[in-house]
Image (cartoon, grey):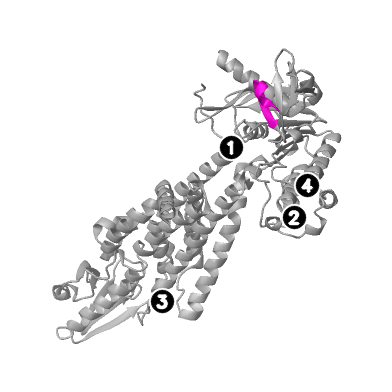
């Protein structure tokens, strides 16, 4: 089953937040929505779960009972304990005898030692994991997580991804938003948003193979028209022609794909 | 340091609501409360009854104002008129003297009436005076019913608005909107605990008033419960409305205080409504506590039945329907998908 947005337009106070975007979210896969601040990721997530109504387009989502959602604020009740938060969600979704599932989620999220701790006293990572566990609790057909890994340490991010991947493996359609391109590479499908439009969409392999021209790496950026810093060195995009002698051609990664796509869009916009 | 001062002024200018509170509110409050703050009694509604009512009427002087003269009314009927709040003082004449009944629940009027009787002692040597409902003219007897209302406002308005704003600030209201709840489930689920706590508070405050301050409870608990329930719906509704226009808890507290303070001073709990300048008195009639105070004081102190409290009860019911209805609508809109403008670019 595929949920998602089809040709969806959303406007906030005459600003177009989403401009005819297609974001399919397939069952059994993790679709990552990547983009910078203001790209429209949260609007897309909110539109998908029904918090925002689009001006036009089609939204496909299961009934409320089958949607799990974690807002960008983690979505946990600070003055409830870990167990109470999960118990409340279980009651809200009418889950019969939820204790074993709650125990399981507490265990896999590593929150066992904080079971009776107030959510407001958890570390940022633990709180995000609790938020994901709450979204996963009703075993939703559609799981929407809005920037669940922002501000998390690498270990917590890995733990959280294991949870998300586990849900997808059980058949859940997952949409996860992030600003990190390295994280987006973990998704089955990546949709890059920029200023409310889809910049690029597909599997990472697809996107990488479709980059026009070549990506090069060099210590001398002056010879490159399109360049960006990567660590201590520079990377550049050559739409055509041969690379300068001191630059070496490197295989592109997702960050390169998105930069090139943004450059191409900018070029199109100036041409128009 | 100047950079800090400049920054602070810049922030102050941007926070329009606080700025308005800092500059306009003290001015408004001074003017309004200046005119409201009066204990002067200008009129005491007086009824003159008994066989010599016509002659006695001639002796009645300011601040007593004769509202009713009826030689056929006997003392028991006169007492009922005071219980029902129709008169402040009843002068019941007989062939061998007169008896003045004074409504002790209207403290300042009662005190003024007693002063008036003392001054008229020479003209009316046989005048017997009886203060009803609050014979010792205790302030606490008059204040406790109104204070119970104030406590209900505190829980109903302030705590409810904070509870809803906190939910929105934490982003969990959004979470509730996505969960399989209906809008009204979230609304009633959110405010029911405050309703219960406020009810419990009311019971505790009234019990404490009765036990500690000897406040009488002469009327029907059911009538008071009805008035309290209607009043609570209004205050909870105001709390939800405040939350819907407040971005954070600080703003909610500011607004809640702006609704509490006028009720403290203009509802007749401290300053009698009759003593206020007409220009501010009408403000008192817009406040729910004014009507709850009339009901609570009427039931507890005077033992007034519901039939004589229909006006404040009806006004509170109308306020409850309007305010609570508006609160439900605003809350439902908040949980509904965000409104989108149609003017696409």
Residue A70: % across, % down: 70, 42
Residue labelled with disc 3: B140
Task: Measure the C-alpha gap from mark 2 to mark 1.
Answer: 28 Å
Quadrant of image for the N terminus of chain B: bottom left
Q: Are marks 2 and 1 in contact (CB under 8 Å)?
A: no
Q: CA distance from mark 2 to mark 4?
A: 17 Å
Q: Chain of mark 2?
A: A
Marker disc for residue A168: none
User: Where are the magenta residues, as a range?
Assistant: A220-229
In the picture of the structure, the residue carrying the numbered disc 1 is: B336
Asked whether, in this view, residue B188 is left or right of residue B237, the answer is: right
Q: Are marks 4 and 1 in contact (CB under 8 Å)?
A: no
How much space separates mark 3 and mark 1, taking CA atoms? 47 Å
Report helix, strand or loop for mark 4. helix
Task: Please give the chain letter of the residue carrying mark 3.
Answer: B
Whole-Å distance between the Cαs marked 2 and 3? 47 Å
Percent across and percent down for residue A158 are: 81, 43
Q: Which mark is residue A82?
A: 2
Lower position in the chain sequence, tag 2 or tag 4: 2
Residue drawn at point x = 81 percent, y = 30 percent: A29
Task: Kindly identify which chain the residue marked by label 4 belongs to.
Answer: A
* Quarter-of-image position of residue B274: bottom left
**Do the residues at discs 3 and 1 belong to one chain?**
yes
Label 2 sits on a secondary structure element that is helix
Q: Which residue is mark 4?
A: A156
């Amino acid at each position: 089953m595929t949920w998602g947005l089809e040709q969806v337009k959303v406007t906030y106070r005459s600003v177009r937040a989403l401009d005819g975007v297609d974001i399919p979210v397939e069952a059994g896969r993790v679709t990552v929505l990547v983009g910078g601040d203001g790209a429209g990721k949260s609007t897309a997530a909110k539109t998908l779960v029904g918090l925002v109504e689009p001006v036009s387009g089609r939204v496909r989502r299961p009934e409320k009972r089958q949607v799990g959602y974690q807002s960008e604020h983690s979505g946990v009740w600070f003055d409830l304990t870990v167990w109470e938060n999960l118990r409340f969600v279980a009651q809200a979704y009418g889950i019969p005898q939820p204790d074993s599932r709650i125990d399981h989620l507490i265990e896999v999220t590593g929150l066992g030692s904080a079971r009776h701790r107030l959510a407001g006293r958890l570390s940022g990572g633990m709180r995000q994991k609790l938020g994901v566990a709450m979204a996963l609790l009703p075993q939703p057909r559609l799981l929407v997580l809005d920037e669940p890994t922002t501000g998390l340490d690498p270990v917590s991010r890995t733990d959280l991804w294991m949870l998300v991947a586990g849900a997808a493996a059980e058949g859940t359609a997952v949409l996860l938003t992030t600003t990190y391109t390295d994280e987006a590479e973990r998704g089955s499908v990546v949709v890059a948003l920029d200023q409310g439009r889809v910049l690029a969409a597909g599997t990472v392999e697809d996107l990488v193979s479709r980059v026009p021209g070549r990506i090069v790496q060099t210590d001398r950026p002056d010879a490159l028209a399109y360049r960006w810093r990567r660590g201590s060195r520079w990377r550049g995009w050559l739409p055509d022609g041969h690379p300068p002698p001191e630059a070496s051609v490197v295989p592109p990664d997702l960050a390169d794909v998105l930069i090139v796509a943004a450059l191409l869009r900018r070029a199109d916009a100036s041409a128009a | 340091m100047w950079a800090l001062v400049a920054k602070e002024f810049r922030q102050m200018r941007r926070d329009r609501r606080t700025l308005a509170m800092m500059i306009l509110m003290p001015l408004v409050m001074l003017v309004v409360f200046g005119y409201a703050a009066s204990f002067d009694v200008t009129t005491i509604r007086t009824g003159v009854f008994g066989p010599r009512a016509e002659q006695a009427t001639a002796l009645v002087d300011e601040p007593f104002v004769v509202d009713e003269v009826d030689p056929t009314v006997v003392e028991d009927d006169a007492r009922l008129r005071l219980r029902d709040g129709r008169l402040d003082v009843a002068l019941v004449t007989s062939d061998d003297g007169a008896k003045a009944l004074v409504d002790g629940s209207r403290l300042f009027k009662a005190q003024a009436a007693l002063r008036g009787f003392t001054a008229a002692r020479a003209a009316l040597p046989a005048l017997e005076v009886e203060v009803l409902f609050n014979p010792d003219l205790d302030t606490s007897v008059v204040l406790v019913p109104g204070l119970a209302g104030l406590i209900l406002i505190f829980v109903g308005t302030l705590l409810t608005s904070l509870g809803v704003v906190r939910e929105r600030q934490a982003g969990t209201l959004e979470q509730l909107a996505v969960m399989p709840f209906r809008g009204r489930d979230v609304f009633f689920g959110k405010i029911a605990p405050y309703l219960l706590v406020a009810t419990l508070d009311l019971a505790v405050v009234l019990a404490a008033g009765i036990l500690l301050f000897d406040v009488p409870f002469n009327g029907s608990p059911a009538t008071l419960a009805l008035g309290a329930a209607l009043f609570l719906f209004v205050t909870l509704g105001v709390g939800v409305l405040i939350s819907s226009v407040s971005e954070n808890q600080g703003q909610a507290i500011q607004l809640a205080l702006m609704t509490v303070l006028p009720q403290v001073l203009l509802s007749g709990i401290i300053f009698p409504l009759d003593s206020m300048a007409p220009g501010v008195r009408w403000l008192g009639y817009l406040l729910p506590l004014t009507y709850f105070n009339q009901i609570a004081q009427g039931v507890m102190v005077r033992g007034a039945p519901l039939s004589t409290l229909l006006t404040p009860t009806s006004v509170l019911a109308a306020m409850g329907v309007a305010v609570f209805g508006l609160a439900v609508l605003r809350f439902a809109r908040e949980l509904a998908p965000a409104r989108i403008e149609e003017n696409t670019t």
